[in-house]
Image (tube, rainbow, N blue to C red):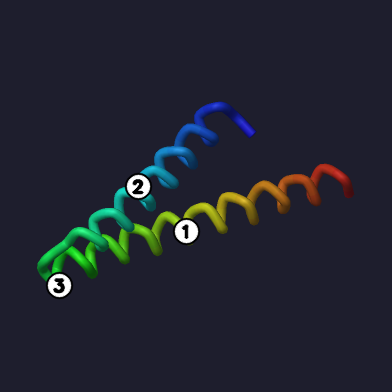
Amino acid sequence: MSIGEWLVLALACAAGVVGLLLAASGDERTLYVLGLGLFAGAVIYAALFIKRHFDRLDRTQH
């Protein structure tokens, strides 16, 4: 995995934390939903990143 991919993953994780903080402090429903959506997007991205990593490992072993 390249350094750039790890940096993008770190940014996605940071965005997920910001999303949780936004949802926790949001007084309006819109901010709450936006924060949870941002967090969910970060979790999905991280899961796909992990899947892609192991798919690459499987391709190189066979």
The residue at the far top in this view is 3
Q: Residues within 10 Å of mark 3 (few under 14, many from 20)?
A: few
Residue 1: x and y in percent read 64, 34
Q: Which quarter of the figure has residue 41?
A: bottom left
- Give the residue pinned by disc 1: 43
Q: Amino acid at mark 1?
A: Val
Cβ atoms under marks 1 and 2 closer than 8 Å? no
Element class at badge 3? helix
Q: Which mark is residue 15?
A: 2
Q: Which is nearer the eye, 51 or 32? A: 32
Q: Amino acid at mark 3?
A: Arg
Element class at badge 2? helix
Q: CA distance from mark 2 to mark 3?
A: 19 Å
Give the foreground label among 1 and 3. Answer: 3
Q: Is residue 14 above or below residue 41?
A: above
Q: Residue at x 60, y 29 (%)?
A: 2
Whichever of labels 1 and 2 marks the residue nearer the N terminus, that label is 2
Residue 15: x and y in percent read 35, 47
Q: CA distance from mark 1 to mark 3?
A: 21 Å
Q: Amino acid at mark 2?
A: Ala
- Give the residue pinned by disc 3: 29
The residue at the far bottom in this view is 29
Left or right for 60, reference 27: right
Q: Residue at x 72, y 46 (%)?
A: 56
Residue 19: x and y in percent read 30, 55
Q: Residue at x 40, y 39 (%)?
A: 11
Q: Residues within 10 Å of mark 2 (few under 14, many from 20)?
A: some
The residue at the far right in this view is 62
Q: CA distance from mark 1 to mark 2?
A: 10 Å
Whichever of labels 2 and 3 marks the residue nearer the N terminus, that label is 2
Left or right for 25, reference 27: right
Q: Residues within 10 Å of mark 1 (few under 14, many from 20)?
A: some
